[in-house]
Amino acid sequence: MTAAKAKEKIQELTEQINHHNDLYYQKSKPVISDYEFDQLLVELQNLEKEFPDFRLPDSPTQRVGGSITKEFTSVVHRYPMLSLGNTYSAEELKEFDARVAKALDGDDYEYFCELKFDGVSISLIYENGILTRAVTRGDGVRGDDVTNNIKTIRSLPLRIKSKDIPPYFEVRGEVFLPKEVFKQLNKDREDIGEETYANARNTASGTVKMQDSTEVAKRKLDCYLYYLLGENNRVETHSEAIQKLEAWGFNVSPTYKLCKSMPDVLSYIHEWEKKRLELPLDTDGVVIKVNSLEQQERLGFTAKSPRWAISYKYKAESISTKLNAITYQVGRTGAVTPVAELEPVFLAGTTVKRASLHNANEIARLDLRIGDYVFVEKGGEIIPKVTGVDLEKRNPKNKSVQYITTCPECKSILIRKEGEANHYCPNEKGCPPQIKGKIEHFIQRKAMDIDSLGEQTIRQLFELGFVKSPADLFYLTKDQLLKLEKVKDKSAQNMLAGIAQSKTQPFENVLFGMGIRYVGKTVAEKLARHFKNMDALATASYEQLLEAPEVGEKIAQSVVAFFKDQNNHVEIDRLKRAGLNFESTQKEPEKVSNVLDGKSFLISGVFQNYERDQLKNIIIAHGGKVLSSISGKLDFLIAGDNMGPAKREKAEKLEIKIISESDFDAMLAK
Ligand code: IVH
């Protein structure tokens, strides 16, 4: 393709994809399938790789990440990012209102009420309509430039199309992880035996500062905007500013309201006290702002916060109840979770009897003793938590908690790995909840998808001794199933049909279902594509595993350990005999050009502009081959940062060309 043609095509694709993005994320009315959308994006990605100079500042390829930031640049805020004064009562709010009234000297004024979003504040700078910078709050005076990470937020416009925009403006808002996304993220982590995150806000904050924007893109952050700053915005009130933001395509929470007076403000606060729990994100209060910008100016700022705004914080509903006991749950991976068994108490709409205590550190931090009265709270999440001990009610005879040393289910001695908060039961093959958990993991939708079996069926099958491992499912007989409670001919038939049907699940689902620690669905897909079949994966060395996309040391070690265990080979053989898929049918990426025909590459280290995986796909798409080790057959070693010295030495000895990322780009551009 000629350069002129490429430039034109890049422009066309950028516009087209941004249009579809808008239809999907702003208007919720997509007109093309996800697949068609992805095809367009891949086409643009490939063109931008070949002609990097033609990439547009609002290119949608930035949404999927691809950049690595070693250290975030510190940026001084043109307008400092202040905080807000907090109030907790109607009384304090009335005092605020009296101060406003006094300062405005008898003028009429209105309040604009919004919810206080519990996320990470961000400042976005738009120059000539293009998002040029996103900066964290930092200490309020200077923050970190996290532009590449923020650009992965789909609902954020990278370019504003309206004509009426000032040449420079800033928009501030709150970046957050939607509750559903957070829940799913934790579920996925639990699935692979990773510790779960404590709350959505801290996770969002950690995500904004991740070094690899590809990882950020996967986290699905979102953002609400609530503050427009700049010199030429031509608005007179905050409500006009909010309307402008909406018209320019920003994501504004629809929960705001203009209030004429303090009683209106109080009823807004009251209205949202319960309703806010149904919103897609965590909120912890209401922000009340004087609506007129001229009046805001007259009111001004204190050193820390504006005099024209205040936040009202909802009290997290908290109640004190007795801690009767601590019990312990063992999960699929053997992780032990302590649970507070409470004297039942009514809190925010439901009766609470139990609350998770997470791990031994948390029990020590709270200094819990059995018989203590503890404070229980419900945050945005439905799961209650113990926030502290009511020391006034403590009986000095209450005994401190001795954390268990043996598994409550199978009596094995628990272990606690260096640097991990959780205790584990090591008896993978003999501990009942671990066995049942493994079978439940195996039948879930993302794995074998056997929905004719459920938790209760698995429990009974295990208790009757019919099923001790996933493979046993495929050798069940109808007579055995008929021994289960309430199971008649028809449902037994159904279960067998579901089990038989599951044999058509692709290899990557089977691999995920095996439950290898740290091998989530995405990693299973990558492993399946890279190694193509179970035998190749099972015999892969630690080094060969590291060469697969998305595989780091932790995963490689875990896979090696899994295949060292003979029991796992026995299980795999039985699954194979039952007829499950152990070969990948995933296709290689489609071919785009022949520029790398006949050339072989080895990828090593970390890259500025590519994920290793991406690089691999590009090589294959342009006709090249990717090898997994250094040998005489290798033509080029693409060296990123942190490539091991041993590799370099070996390549030099064999006189293999060592090239950089930009050498590779140049090679492609030919
Ligand atoms: S307005 C001059 N509106 O709360 C301050 N802030 O405690 C203007 N926040 O740093 C901020 N929701 O991160 C505003 N609807 C909302 C908000 C909000 C959450 C955060 C924001 C700010 C902090 C102040």
Image (cartoon, rainbow, N blue to C red):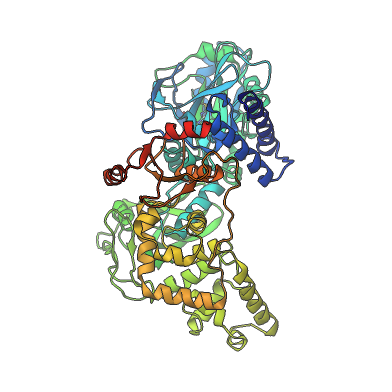
Query: In the image shown, does 163 or 224 lie closer to the viewer?
Result: 163
Q: Is residue 381 visible?
A: no
Q: Kindly give the residue lying farthest to the bottom in the view shown.
A: 479
The quadrant where residue 426 appears: bottom left
Q: Which quadrant does the N terminus fall into?
A: top right
- The residue shown at (27%, 62%) is 398
Q: Position of residue 437 (x, y in %)?
A: 47, 69
Q: Position of residue 242 (x, y in %)?
A: 63, 24
Vertical arrangement, residue 246 with respect to residue 297, above or below: below
Asked if residue 613 lies left or right of residue 374, the reply is right
Asked if residue 358 lies left or right of residue 50, the reply is left
Q: Position of residue 271 (x, y in %)?
A: 62, 39
Vertical arrangement, residue 117 with respect to residue 337, above or below: above
- The residue shown at (43%, 67%) is 332
Query: In the image shown, does 28 or 337 lie closer to the viewer?
Result: 28
Q: Position of residue 548 (x, y in %)?
A: 43, 52
